[in-house]
Amino acid sequence: MQQLATQSEIDFSSETYKDAYSRINAIVIEGEQEAHENYIKLAEMLPEHGEQLIRLSKMENRHKKGFEACGRNLKVTPDMKFAQEFFASLHENFQTAAAEGKVVTCLLIQSLIIECFAIAAYNIYIPVADDFARKITEGVVKDEYSHLNFGEVWLKEHFEESKAELEDANRENLPIVWKMLNAVEKDAEILAMEKEALVEDFMIQYGEALSNIGFTTRDIMRLSAYGLRG
């Protein structure tokens, strides 16, 4: 496989780079905004963890501001309309589940799928980011692992009664991740982020999260296959 450009070979000021960055930057801003709102909703659904979830929502808001600064640093206006459409399916599924009081589905979408997607994207982006964005993204990744941990811990404690709903939510939402990855493949490549690396990192993060909750290796292989069919 041809190696994509290294950081020293990337022209961060080129129009091609800035055009692709306008969509990728918007996606991370919107992703943090979605997470901010989702954690506020989860705090209403899990009042006994409200304080912790509100703290997570505030962290996501800080991340959003950091990524907005990354765009300003490169003099790029994020394409927020594109980003809102990009997240529309997961957003809708989260809202529907929340309205039905399905805490398990909401946690799978936010604490597992969105957090693992973010961690994978940031891990692959950091080596090829401009210096300003790299510092911000490295700080964000550390926080995201603690957000992932909240969902893992809660779902592990409620694993037996959550298992069937987790499997249903996985079946419905994991194929969406594949469509999302396909939608950004060309832009990610311009930023020197390989789709295969994104897929691999996401599947590793997601598989580890499922394992930490209580699923067996055999279960994880079966659950992960839904994404491949998406």
Image (cartoon, rainbow, N blue to C red):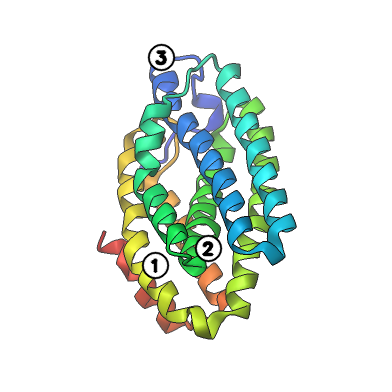
The reply, left or right, for residue 131 in relation to residue 221 is: right
Residue in view at x 39 percent, y 43 percent: 87
Residue 35 spot, x, y in % from top left: 55, 47
Q: Which mark sits nearer the N-terminus, 3 or 1?
A: 3
Residue 17: x, y in percent?
43, 22
Label 2 vs label 3: CA separation?
Answer: 39 Å
| Quarter residue 208 falls in | bottom right
Bin the neighbour count of mark 2 within 10 Å (Cα to Cα): few under 14, some 14-19, many 20 and up: many
Q: Is residue 13 visible?
A: yes
Secondary structure under badge 1?
helix
Does residue 130 appear left or right of residue 162 in this picture? right
The residue labelled by disc 3 is 15
Q: Amino acid at mark 1?
A: Ala
- Residue 169 is tagged as 1
In this view, 76 is above or below 137: above
Asked which secondary structure carries label 2, the reply is: helix
Most foreground residue, 178 or 127:
178
- Front one among 87 and 212: 87
Q: Is residue 186 left or right of residue 53?
A: left
Nearest the camera: 14 or 54?
A: 54
- Identify the disc placed on residue 17: none
- Residue bearing the label numbered 2: 107
Instruction: Answer yes or no: is residue 204 visible.
Output: no
Name the N-terminal-most of marks 2 and 1.
2
Spatial CA distance of label 2 from label 1 is 10 Å
Distance from Cα at disc 3 to Cα at disc 1: 40 Å
Residue type at mark 3?
Glu
Q: Write down the quadrant of residue 175 in the picture.
A: bottom left
Question: Are the residues tagged 2 and 1 within 8 Å (C-beta)?
Answer: no
